[in-house]
Image (tube, helix red, strand yellow):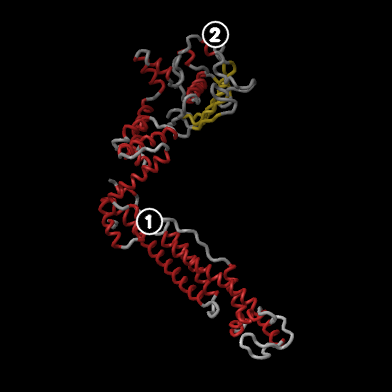
Amino acid sequence: MSAKIRSLAVKGFRAYGGAEQVLSLPGDIAVVWGPNSKGKTSLGEAFEFLLTGCISRRELMASSQDEFADALRNAHLADGQEVYVAATIIAPDGAEHEVKRVLTSDYAKRQDCASRLEIDGAIAEEADLAALGIVLSQPPLQAPVLAQHTLSHIFSVKPADRATYFKALFEITDLDDLRNEIAGLAGELAAPTDAALAKFDRCLEHRLMKPLLSSVERKIPDQTGMSGKLDECIAALLKDSGSAVPETTDDRRAALAGLLADVRSKSFPVRGFNRAALAGWSEPGASVWKQLQTYAGEKAKVDEKTRQLAALFVEALKLPGVGELAEPADCPLCGTRNALTPARMHLIRQHVADTEGFQKAEKEANAAITQLLTSAWNLAEAATAALPSFLKAAAGKRRKEGFAVARLRELLGDEAAAVVEPWLTNVRPVMRLSAALRRRAATLHEQLEQIAANVGGAEIDTEALGVEFKALAEQRTLSRRRSRPMTRPPPTFARP
């Protein structure tokens, strides 16, 4: 068993600042990814410094060692802060150890750096690392760290020296294990299942879009670049069809949508799927029912004969001199002598006073009934308007236009079972619920028309009307929810 590194901690070393950065390595193989200038090389050199107390790049690449003066300590680190690299190592015997190297003196002109190595908190030498299963090679590449500059050196030496170096760094079993791991991972790789990528692949098959989008396969652009590419594709499609190419992106996309609808309509009348959302509607408010209840109460206070004569009494009181009658007078309506006496006029005025509340309530009741009529009518109309166009057309018209399930199955081919049947499963309940909603709204509207035609003579069952409107609201909610699932099959069926 070889030594295993389980974590690496770095503070103040090269690209790493004053806060300790810890890299956990729970597995046997780890991949560290990052863009340029984010610390990958510094991480490798931190491990090299931990094991050897130096970095080989100074020996291999610098034209002058002065170039690496003050190269290890982060330039932005405050004075007095410690610079170190530490690692948790699992030895071949399974014991866990902490290896730490502290920078005590940085590189200077013509002077090497100096450091202090600690193993489990005790001062140690590089030779003590062998007890942990870490065997160093010969200078200048003592540590098992491969980088661009180390690879250049390795391939410049003799083949025998190169083989010796690799054997010192990796056991043969390690290389075999690495190869087997990579081979196993390659077998697990699979193309991602993504609807957007599938659409992109289909676009690449198009003769016009392939040359425009081929560059995207090599390098994915940012959002602005991708939008520009799509705009170019839209312009190319419009131009190829002989259509005018609008100036703005939004207008181009709208033009392409119209062109696509025209192309699809040649295969199938897709506009038959068009539908509007169910228009807003709310249950009649409490004030409506209160007006009807008030009317019922006022009506019960006044007998029917008085209600019928109320208008006549009001007009009689408007006659000149009648309202202030002090002695008997002839009736101006029938001519009866001394028919109107002060006592009778007092009684008439009392009847008028008794019916004022009723007349007001009757007027408000008429307005409430009109509001209920409008509400029921609007809901019936909205339920019809919200249906897909093909459900509002007569069967003969649908057949004439070619809107038929058999035609859908024919166009979809192998995809028919996965598309048409689920679609029909969703459409049928929508049809039934919409029809039931329209019937209930129409029935209620008819009932309200009969009440409106004879408000004074009919008994208005306010409670029953409230129950009907409550049921209507619940049925509308159910119809609205049920119509949300797929009411049209996906547009793939209409490929030209």
Residue at point 28% right, 56% down? 401
User: On the image, which quarter does residue 387 sit in?
Assistant: bottom left
The reply, left or right, for residue 397 in relation to residue 171 is: left
Camera-side mark, 2 or 1: 1
- Expressed as whole percent of the image width and height from the top left, the position of residue 107 reads 55, 14
- Outermost residue to the right: 326
> Is residue 400 visible to the viewer in this orientation of the structure?
yes
Q: Position of residue 441 (x, y in %)?
A: 45, 68
Q: Residues within 10 Å of mark 1 (few under 14, many from 20)?
A: many
Q: Is residue 241 above or below residue 482?
A: above
Task: Please state if 132 lies on the left or on the right of 307 as rendered.
Answer: left
Q: Is residue 295 above or below residue 305?
A: above
Tell me the quarter of the picture where residue 420 sits. Answer: bottom left
Identified by mark 1, the residue type is Thr
Question: Where, by quadrant of the figure, is residue 361 drawn?
Answer: bottom right
10 Å crowding of disc 2: few (<14), some (14-19), many (20+): few
Work out whether 147 lies above or below 347: above
> Tag 2, which secondary structure?
loop
> Residue 68 at what x, y percent from top left?
53, 13
Residue 487's tag is: 1
Which residue is labeled 2 in the image? 110
Residue 493 in view, yes or no: no
The residues bearing labels 2 and 1 have C-alpha atoms spaced at a distance of: 80 Å
Residue drawn at point x = 28 percent, y = 49 percent: 266
Q: Position of residue 2 (x, y in %)?
A: 43, 28
Residue depicted at 50% across the width and 71% down the height: 468
